[in-house]
Amino acid sequence: GQGGSRMASGVELAEVDLGVDEEPASASAAITSDRAVELVGFGSFHVWLTLILTLGNAADAVEVLSIALVLPNLTHFSDADKGALTAAVFAGALVGAVAWGLAGDLVGRRPALVASLLLNGLFALASSAVGERLGALCACRFFAGIGVAGTNAVAFTLLPEFLPASKRGVGVVVLASGWMCGSVYSAAVGWSVIPKRGWRAFLAASSAPALVGAAAAAARVPESPRFLCARGRCLEAAAVMRAVARRTK
């Protein structure tokens, strides 16, 4: 049953040398993934994790806000066309919020995070190439919106699962600040790029935070130990916590 699964997860983690000063009283003492996170503490790994996820949240803001800077340049579109283009990203986000929440619980936080950032970045980049074709632009915005919802849902789940309790509040605040950073990036790049190189170059530049975030997440973000334990992959959870302990020192 569920109780047996939780105990098995704790035993697997207890048998791993986390390389920290405090250890369980005996190898048979069951500890949960949350207890392992507390034992490891806070260090450089958590700083990098927070920065990468904050970049992902910033990429969400860039994608959502970029269209407001583009619309005045789409002079051939009617007001209804511009409304449809604005709504497309939110329609995608509505679908993505459900889909990525399920994906994060079924296949893992890490693959869902990387895939959602890639979806956001690639379709933001594609929107710079399709020109003033309403249907194509709306489709690109819709699929980018699916990615936006995934990054938001997964990042705010993944970060607390790696942070000790004393750091979770601060960590989530920093993560949330990514939206403001993305807003500043979008405005600054739009102000500097659109008058000189046009709105399509601006949309291409707007894809950069998501694509960089996807590469950083793929390279440096491990799977959540809580997810691994919940799925019965206890040895993998222990290996993740050993690696985090080494990177925390």
Image (spheres, rainbow, N blue to C red):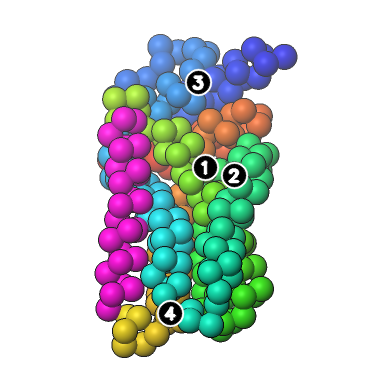
- Between discs 3 and 2, the one toward the N terminus: 3
Q: Residues within 10 Å of mark 2 (few under 14, many from 20)?
A: many
Tag 4 or tag 2, which sits nearer the N-term? 4
Please say whether residue 50 is visible from this viewpoint.
Answer: yes
Q: Contact (CB < 8 A) between labels 3 and 2?
A: no
Label 2 secondary element = helix
Q: Residue at x 42, y 66 (%)?
A: 68
Q: Is residue 120 visible?
A: no
Label pair 4/3, CB-CB below 8 angstroms:
no
- 181 and 78: which one is in front? 78
Q: Are marks 1 and 2 in contact (CB under 8 Å)?
A: yes
Dot 1 falls on a residue whose secondary structure is helix
Q: Which residue is mark 4?
A: 73
What amino acid type should be assigned to the residue bearing mark 4?
Answer: Asn
Residue beneath disc 2: 97
Q: Is residue 53 above or below residue 170?
A: below
Give the alpha-carbon distance from disc 2 to disc 4, as whole Å.
Answer: 30 Å
Residue 214 shown left or right of residue 190 in the figure: right
Q: Which of the marked residues, 1 or 4, is nearer the chain's N terminus? A: 4
Q: Residue furthest right?
A: 1
Q: Which callout, 1 or 3, points to the residue nearer the camera?
A: 1
Identified by mark 3, the residue type is Thr
Q: Mark 3: few, some, or many residues within 10 Å (few <14, many ≥20)?
A: many
Q: On residue 153, which mark appears? A: 1
Mark number displayed over residue 32: 3
SS for dot 4 = helix
> Within 10 Å of the Cα at label 4, are there few (<14), some (14-19), or many (20+) other Cα atoms?
few
Find numbered disc 3 in the image and state the secondary structure of the residue it sits on: loop
Screen quadrant of the N terminus: top right
